[in-house]
Amino acid sequence: MPAKASCEVKTRTVRQPQKNGDIYVIERQTRYDPVKKYNVVLSSRIIGKIPKGETSVVPTRPKRSSGEKVSVSNEPDLPVLASRRKVGMMDIIDHIGKASGIDDAIYASTDQGAAKKILSLARYLLATNGQSFPGITTWQFTHPLPYEEGLSEDIYHDLFETVGRDESLIQSFFESRLSSLGGKALLAYDSTTVSTYSGRISEARYGFNKAHDGLETVKLLSLYSIETRQPVAFTKQPGNQPDVITIENALKQLQVLGINSAEIVTDNGYYSEKNLAELLHAHFDFITLIKNSIKWVKKELDSHLDEFRTTSSACPFDINTHGITIMRMQEFSRARKYASTKKGLAEGDEEIFRRRIYLHLYFNPLRRVEQDTVFDKDIFELKALIEGGASEEDLSDSAAEKARKFLHIRHYGSKCTVTFNEKAIATQKKYHGYFALVSNCEKDPFECLRKYRQRETIEFFFESGKQRADGNRTRVWSSECLMGRMFVQFVALCYYEHLSEQLRQLKQSLASEIADPENETSETLKNKKKLLSWLKNTPVYLTLQWFDAVEEVKVSTKLLSRRWTTEITARDRLLLEKLGVPAF
């Protein structure tokens, strides 16, 4: 039978390890509670600590009572505490994150710790113009970031893996980006390739490499809002996948994220009758570049060649370009995913349907001259290669095909003579200068052309990703890390595109205010002219770097604390005011 508890107060000493390696020596008083049947702690007092790496106990500072200051003789007297941080550029970036809604969307998509790490890495990419991530380990000491605990290579590597596996986080952020567009969105859809040295990324394949560096690539596909000039979503696919097969997944992503009405603009890499059928079936509008060589397009072009010489066919905003529109009832087909008793079709059967589409044909004489010049240069180079002894096996497939089509090659013993096939060349040049767009919604050829040309903004976006977000190489060794890294880069590009658009609008606003000043003092007008001239000649990165010279100094003494920042000029103060950034 167990002994009866005495219920006396007992005093004992315990050692409690801390995260920093120190060990606290704690004196505790306990008493057994017969009702609760366990020892209850009556009091706990720290009597000393064993510093990390030592064995002897060091007394700790006694707890101070309210209003009492305690001086410990073995601690050094620190009369002044001071710090210096570069805050000018970071305050602007912080304002961008809040004003654009990017920060709120990230915080709403994941826990606070992960959100702060993502935003810190994205801000680092923007502030350094795409420096590689290892540089953040020292850079963060002088620049304030949302994640104050500090980022090491292990921390952000683990973050990439976590984010790469968290599809809910990624899609939630995309949903937030798309919901901010409102109304009917005008979206550009295109792809680029990212090279990799890694042999462990399953999506890395040999295919068309836009960098032409001979490496395996991963394909990055993006949706970009043309009107707001903001990236809204992305995905990755194996590098050997052709663009033409990717449109169906993009439509599914838009629909599941709540976008059921959008106008999608693509180049000719995405044209196929299957893709048009999918767009029409999903009730999305589209504009896409289409090749002149397609049979029904070529037939329409031959029938309307004389119409491009009229003055009325000239484009109002580009007189060198002439355009006409042909409305057609086009037949499309798509494989049914489900059987239809009403239509008598089984699953997988081809369903035929007809829709109205608008074929817009264009001609530009300057474009014809350029294409003729490039064509002639290629043919002359090819002729010289063959006359120099190159055989058909030495040529690339495309070059060999050109040689067979446009050159007459005759061999007389060891001698080779090459002449031009002028008839075939004339047939080829007949269609130089012409191009075509097809749409199911745009009836006016020049409005359709205007929207298509705006698609070029996504090309600038891809260029920014590679030059300003460290996007030329994957720099990771697994698919999960790659997706997490791409997401952080995407957030950084959201920052960059928002700031770029703000600066574009500001330049337009300043030009208008200078041209028509109202109640402006001469000094204000002078500063506006200075600011406009500076912005026109300074890229976004250098604009941010200019403000990186603004430092904040904090000094605390026993008597009081003070902070101050570097002074800025009237021109710089005007820029901050126009952007809505709080004064430093």
Image (tube, rainbow, N blue to C red):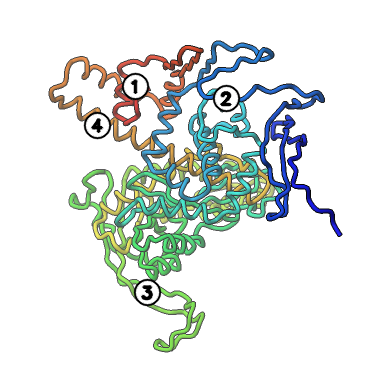
Q: Which mark is residue 331?
A: 3
Q: Is residue 430 visible?
A: no
Tally of marks: 4
The quadrant of the rendering that contains the C terminus is top left
Q: Residue 509 carries which label?
A: 4
Tell me the amino acid under the disc marked 1.
Trp
Pick the front one: 226 or 384: 226
> Seen in the image, is 49 located left or right of residue 207?
right
Q: Identify residue for label 2.
A: 141
- Asked if disc 1 and disc 3 are in contact, CB closer than 8 Å, the reply is no
Q: How far apart are marks 4 and 3 (CA)?
A: 48 Å
Q: How far apart are marks 3 and 2 (CA)?
A: 63 Å
Please tell me which of labels 1 and 3 falls first in the chain.
3
Q: How far apart are marks 1 and 3 (CA)?
A: 55 Å
Tell me the amino acid under the disc marked 3.
Glu
Please tell me which of labels 3 and 2 falls first in the chain.
2
User: Picture coordinates of residue 409 (x, y %)?
Assistant: 58, 52
User: Picture coordinates of residue 370 (x, y %)?
Assistant: 39, 42
